[in-house]
Image (cartoon, helix red, strand yellow):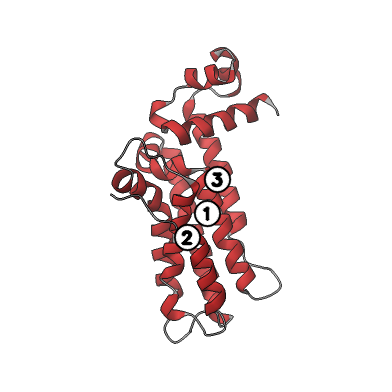
Amino acid sequence: MKTRDRILEASLQLFNEQGERAVTTNHIAAHLGMSPGNLYYHFRNKQQIIAELFDHYERELEDSLALPADRGLDLDDKARYVESLSESLWRYRFLQRDLEHLLASDAQVAERYRLFSRRALQAVEGIFQGTIDAGILDARYANAEVLALNSWLLMNSWTNFLCTTVLTDPQVQLTPQMQRRAVYQVLAQELGLLSDAARPRVEAMLRDYYTELPDA
């Protein structure tokens, strides 16, 4: 792995484990066993590292939300969307946990995030409209715009909810299973909108993504 990539991976690990505000470039360099000067050769400051990690997150999420180019959606697509979204939110969970601080600290990242969030919301709305068109959700009752906005808000606030409301015991750490519960919450809002043909598959997905949360 190239040094630049090693720095990014180490930074992502430390930001996720300790929170971005608790990690300095000196911590990152020490974690990698390199001198701070070697790190600064690749990144002038921590903000540059965060900006590049956000770039990776942005591209990864937009790729995972792309609609098929030559066909409609099916239940396999729905399963792929929720799984890839869950994986990305876990991998870059520090962005959700510290988002307000990160955007306040860097005007350029804040503007990029605003544009990215709008594009992502449009993509999610397109996915919901695709599931309506495919008969997975009942077109008489399902509203793609409402479902997309609710889902986007829920997925992006879930990590912060866990850290501020659920994980009150410092001995209990955030886990991928807790993060996956966000997908359950998104799917659960669709229960009353599912077609009979889609219901068994989605109910199986709900069972897979459910996990009991610690007592708040």
Q: Can you see residue 114?
A: yes
In the image, which disc is placed on residue 70? Answer: none
Going by the picture, which residue comes out furthest to the bottom? Answer: 140
Q: Which residue is mark 1?
A: 86
User: From the viewer's perspective, is residue 22 above or below residue 135?
Assistant: above
Left or right: where 172 falls relative to 5: left
Mark 2 residue type: Val
Closer mark to the observer between disc 1 and disc 3: 1
Question: Residue 157: image x %, image y %?
Answer: 38, 52
User: Counting other residues with Cα less than 10 Å from the Cα at mark 2, is it few (<14), some (14-19), or many (20 or more)?
Assistant: many
Q: Residue at the spot x=57%, y=84% of the render? A: 197
Q: Cβ–Cβ below 8 Å for labels 2 and 1?
A: yes
Question: Residue 215: image x %, image y %?
Answer: 30, 50
Q: Residue at the spot x=48%, y=80% of the render? A: 194
Question: Residue 90: image x %, image y %?
Answer: 50, 46
Left or right: where 119 falls relative to 105: right
User: From the viewer's perspective, is residue 65 above or below residue 32?
Assistant: below
Q: Residue at the spot x=70%, y=27% of the render? A: 2
Residue 155 is drawn in which quadrant? Answer: bottom left
Which callout, 1 or 3, points at the residue further toward the start of the chain? 3
User: From the viewer's perspective, is residue 31 above or below residue 206?
Assistant: above
| Element class at badge 2 | helix
Q: CA distance from mark 2 to mark 3?
A: 18 Å
Question: Residue 18: image x %, image y %?
Answer: 42, 31
Mark 3 residue type: Tyr
Report the quarter where the N terminus lies: top right
